[in-house]
Image (cartoon, coloured by chain):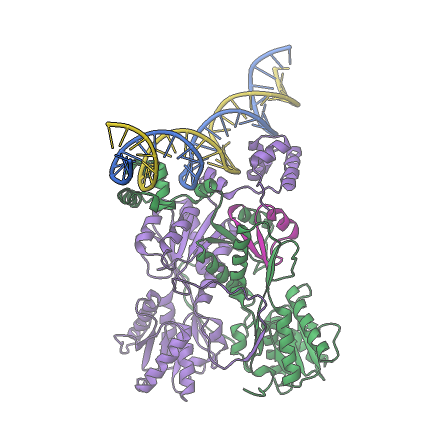
Chain colours: A green, B purple, C blue, D yellow
Amino acid sequence: MAGKVPTVYDVAERAGVSIATVSRYFRNPEAVRETTRDRVRAVVRDLGYVPSGSARGLAARRTGTIGVCFPSFDDVDHIDPVDLGEGLPVTVRFDPSEHIDTGSNLYISEVIRGTELEAWRHGLAVMIAVPRGRRRHEVIDNLAGRVDGLVTLARAVPDDQLAHIARRLPVVLMAGPRESDTYDHVSADNRGGTIALTRHLIHDHHLRGLQFVAGPMNSPDSQDRFEGFSEALLLAGLDVPEHPLAHGDFTRTGGRALARRLLEREQLTGVGALVCANDQTALGLLDALTEAGVRVPEDIALTGFDGIEAAHLASPRLTTVRQPMIDLGRVAVAQLLHRLAHPATAPVSRVLPVEVLLRESCGPHPST
Amino acid sequence: MAGKVPTVYDVAERAGVSIATVSRYFRNPEAVRETTRDRVRAVVRDLGYVPSGSARGLAARRTGTIGVCFPSFDDVDHIDPVDLGEGLPVTVRFDPSEHIDTGSNLYISEVIRGTELEAWRHGLAVMIAVPRGRRRHEVIDNLAGRVDGLVTLARAVPDDQLAHIARRLPVVLMAGPRESDTYDHVSADNRGGTIALTRHLIHDHHLRGLQFVAGPMNSPDSQDRFEGFSEALLLAGLDVPEHPLAHGDFTRTGGRALARRLLEREQLTGVGALVCANDQTALGLLDALTEAGVRVPEDIALTGFDGIEAAHLASPRLTTVRQPMIDLGRVAVAQLLHRLAHPATAPVSRVLPVEVLLRESCGPHPST
DNA sequence: ACGGTGAATGTATGCGCATACAATGAGAGT
DNA sequence: ACTCTCATTGTATGCGCATACATTCACCGT
């Protein structure tokens, strides 16, 4: 590679045409006569020419790239160099039966897939960045400088910086609280989904003593779901708890710890169902309850939220609310493109429909 | 946003300095006097200035971005527009107990995480692209034009095109066959892992009649694993089958279909263990075997490869070989950076160590 | 007081391409 | 033969920044 990377000038010279023709060959081939096209094509192949994205972006005043920002999977300042592991032997070990936390990576992965898919449909590239560590500001600015627009999961970017880059590019927020007066926003119907799920527990399973197990205090998703939970209780004329029964951290491990604490303090007596803010937490509860001899759903019903695969693989299978994670990414990008085409219109807030998946963890199915 | 995006010139004028100073403020702040720095900083904030990545890339002759290429999750030419789903209601339905195929997305997601992580460590951005559909060539060229180097999963990019862009940038291949005389290459120790696993089955569980269930014919990973399998049999002085017992497609659904076929044709009599080319296939086999009343591991032992979460959640838990998927991405990027720093050295082929995870699907554990 | 030194800043240029505009040439129409 | 039209190609310019080099100026030692 390298040596001297060829440019339009090299191609033009070798093909006996002007640089404009070479440029047209790529940007608008129909405008070039076929015989000329062939000559250019041959030279391009010969020289190993690839147009410079930077030059293109500069001249065209658009990059053809959209940026995607995520909160850090792994909130750290420093990450060790990877072990190149040269020559290390294969290890063989018994794997004790502990549960693992694949956590929210999955959620993020799906969103990435969605953004990539939609971007591809429109011939755009995707640049991803995770602002983490001490230089997170730079990471974001670098991204902002290289893209035509940005979609970001809520709270991946500090507010002040978001405001700063939003002066240069359109920004679409995914999930999190709607700040609809400022940015376009896309989220799943957390509230509606939880209402529907809770209604099902109340009316179809005749459960009472429902409690909500939340995620982190500051999670807007968790808050929305708790709101939906409360709303459903209210509509059913049942007592509405002021607060969630407990707060987890959205991980399975956290859920297990939480359940043990609840069992220890006997806070589950009289509780007919636990509506959890996400699947991982619910699965953690399920682990600990099962371990303690509490039967699900016979002794207590349990539900999650997200629709991850592990919820399906659990025993009993976990009733949950499936979020359209891929669509979250796709719609965000679609909205971004709409915004690029229509800069002046008012910010939009889209709420994507969710799907309540009834499985065994909430009790036997009345019908079906 | 937009209106008129400010440039260095605007900032320089407002701050009463030259554009060189503004540029230095970003690139090399220590070279600017502190009081000047403050003035520039204020103007930058005022104006909402973000340096243009394109201009930067052009002037500096490097983009600070690396590209990552993946084969298509979903091999299609056309993908429907996403349903914006405005106002659609929440649906509630019973979810029948069928298995789902999360497939290889997971593998790819992990690799993406790895590349992002390592790139972040070095202050680089990551651009991802999935060449699919009729314009896949363009997708790749666009990517190649915008990055300083490229890592790609094997066979995501057609050979001829890979050769073309490799003249412009360093390329590192992940997984797949080593073409070590041309490109840098990183892969997991498929062969070694399968040897260790197979030896365990033979020596610790005294299993005989081992058969291999492969992936797609053209999968180099599957081939490597079959080689390891054969090698282990050979070393143990056992008969080495010429071919895998069957070929799946790496999906769980495919594995189920395959198992039913094997059962129907009674091809499992005398088979003591099925060594599968990946976890999904093994899990599919497990589904179908269990359904047919064949007990694992009592009647037949079963192993997978990859170490996905579902293998851990299966019942019995699936013995498997864990690939360091994140490290695959990390090492690939690390190697890419090394190549950028040392263009002249010979191509390297790195083999990452794997870990055999012994669980219940291969039989009771002799010790431990 | 004078040349020397180094820090801070400014000037000028080119990176590789897209594109507005000009130029050319080959028919078509008269 | 001449003008007009359209297809094709060329010329010239600027996109926004990094950076080599030049300049300025404060300060030092003698």
Residue A301, magenta (yes or no): no
Placement of B260 over or under A321, stated as above or below: below
| Image quadrant containing the N terminus of chain A | top left
Q: In this view, does A306 lie to the left or right of B173?
A: right
Quadrant of res A306: bottom right
| Image quadrant containing the C terminus of chain A | bottom right
Which span is picked out in magenta? A145-174
Using the rendered image of the protein, determine whether residue A3 is visible from the camera's viewpoint.
no
Residue A151, magenta (yes or no): yes
Q: In this view, does B72 lie to the left or right of B12?
A: left
Q: Number of numbered discs present?
A: 0
Placement of A190 over or under A155, stated as above or below: below
Which residue is painted at 42% across and 86% down in the image? B291
Residue B211 versus residue B63: which sits nearer the camera?
Answer: B63
Residue A53 versus residue B118: which sits nearer the camera?
Answer: A53
Where residue B186 appears, x then y in whole percent?
39, 58
Where residue A151 appears, x then y in whole percent?
55, 55
Which residue is painted at 74% across and 80% down in the image? A237
Quadrant of res A20: top left
Where residue A85 appears, x then y in whole percent?
43, 59
Q: Residue furthest bottom?
A: B293
Placement of B146 over or under A310, stated as above or below: above
Which residue is painted at 38% across and 84% down in the image? B300
Using the rendered image of the protein, determine whether residue B277 is visible from the camera's viewpoint.
yes
Q: Is residue B47 left or right of residue A102?
A: right
Where residue B62 appears, x then y in whole percent?
45, 42
